[in-house]
Amino acid sequence: MAAGYLDILRARHAVRLLTGTLVGRLPNGTAPIAIVLFTRAEGGGYALAGALAAVYGLGTAVGQPLLGRAVDLYGQPRVQLPAAVLSALGMTLLAVAGFGSLPLAYGAVALAGVATPPLEGGLRALWPSVLGSEDRVHRAYAMDAVAQEVMFTVGPLLVTLLVSLWSPAAALLVINAIGVLGALSVVLSEPSRTWRSAPREAHWLGALRSPGLLALLGSFFFVGLALGSITVAGVAYADDHGRDSVYGWLMAALGLGALIGGAVYGARQWSGPPERRLRVIVALLALGYLPLTLTPGVVAMTVLAGVAGVFLAPAIACSFIVVDRHAPRGTVTEAFSWLVTTFGVGAAAGTAVAGPAVELGGTAWSFAVAGAGGVAALLVLLATGRVLAAPGHSAVAVRGSENDRNGAVEPGFSSGHQA
């Protein structure tokens, strides 16, 4: 298992790109908790903190596909680094100005969200030219999904450490400064500087003109909804058992399950269409969420949370492959950014729905939202099977194409840009 991942990490530029992307995404991965801690430290209530976090999330949802399209049109360095700087300036303004003017605070957070650089989509657009073969790229997608779980685990811990050592304002400043350095590391690398998207057909819908991509986005909205609802349901479960630490155990188990699932998924080669494989994985994901409604004792519930997380990273990794197959010519970064946005919007919807579910029917009902989300995601994939079975482009890459200047991509493998 480890040998396959080591093979990827030994590739030239791979470690730098993966590390730089994860570091560059720290501000985005830690923004909700950093905003809440800063707001509370400044005397604001949870309602204000939640509203600011929601504005940031909405800004990110709007900005990611727009910036992704800009990357496809103008290249990575001309978009990613200025966006990272603007986003950091927005958070810096919030940290310095505080809440003397609420409109200014909301504007600062909105700027930080909208300007969040699409580093995640950018990395996936770079993997084919860095790694070459199809199998290595697919394994890199799985490694990417696992690395995300690590970031979302380590990031909040880093924020709380900075808060304890200095202050919430300092945490905002340091995390965003680190994020800019991560983006700088990526855009100064050779693959990022030389990458060019394939020529694209002028169309106002951009990547969204692909029926297959729309089907995938519809499914992953509900996957995001399921995951978002679990964060609220976990808090309700911890309250029921009178210990805040229970929530941490549930989330840690969920993350550990995703780490294990992603590592195992990426360690082997898979045959057959990824669209068919994705349906199976999402079915198993839904099956893993349903038992959470039983809400047994803490030990059993922690085990169930671990099982529920096992198929999340494989589902995300497989979705990357499907996006690559269905993205219209010249829109690969935008297409990946739409997946990030849709997943995030679904997660926000899940948190919004799970809250009332707790009040209406208790903790079990909030976990039922997660199960329903998983089932809905599967139903979308089943209903759109014919659309997903017909990728929007041929899987033939032309050696020496503008996205493969060193001829790194093997014949017969799509680099994410259609021939």
Image (spheres, rainbow, N blue to C red):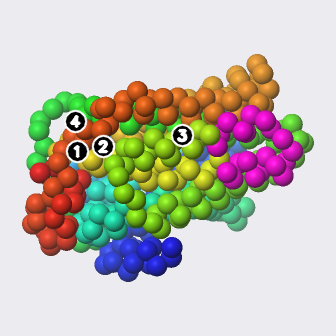
The secondary structure type at the circle numbered 4 is helix
**Residue lying furthest front:** 272
Magenta-span inclusion, residue 292:
yes
Q: CA distance from mark 1 to mark 4?
A: 7 Å
**Amino acid at the residue labelled 2:** Ala
Give the number of the mark in front: 3 or 4.
Answer: 3
Q: Which mark is residue 283?
A: 3
Q: CA distance from mark 4 to mark 2?
A: 9 Å
Q: Which mark is residue 278?
A: none
Q: Earlier in the sequence, mark 3 or mark 1?
A: 3
Give the number of the mark in front: 3 or 1.
Answer: 3
Q: CA distance from mark 3 to mark 1?
A: 29 Å
The secondary structure type at the circle numbered 1 is loop
Where is residue 250 shown, x and y percent of the image? 74, 50
Where is residue 360 shown, x and y percent of the image? 76, 19
CB under 8 Å between callouts 1 and 4? yes
Tally the numbered discs: 4
Q: Earlier in the sequence, mark 4 or mark 2?
A: 4
**Amino acid at the residue labelled 4:** Gly
Residue range in magenta is 288-307
> In the figure, is residue 364 to the left or right of 109?
right
**Residue at the spot of label 2:** 335
Seen from the viewer's position, the closer of residues 114 and 268 is 268
**Residue at the spot of label 1:** 331
Residue at coordinates 71% horizontally, 48% vertically from top-left? Answer: 305
> In the figure, is residue 341 to the left or right of 297?
left
- 200 in relation to 415, above or below: above
Mark 3 crowd level (few <14, some 14–19, many ≥20, 10 Å Cα): many
**Amino acid at the residue labelled 1:** Thr
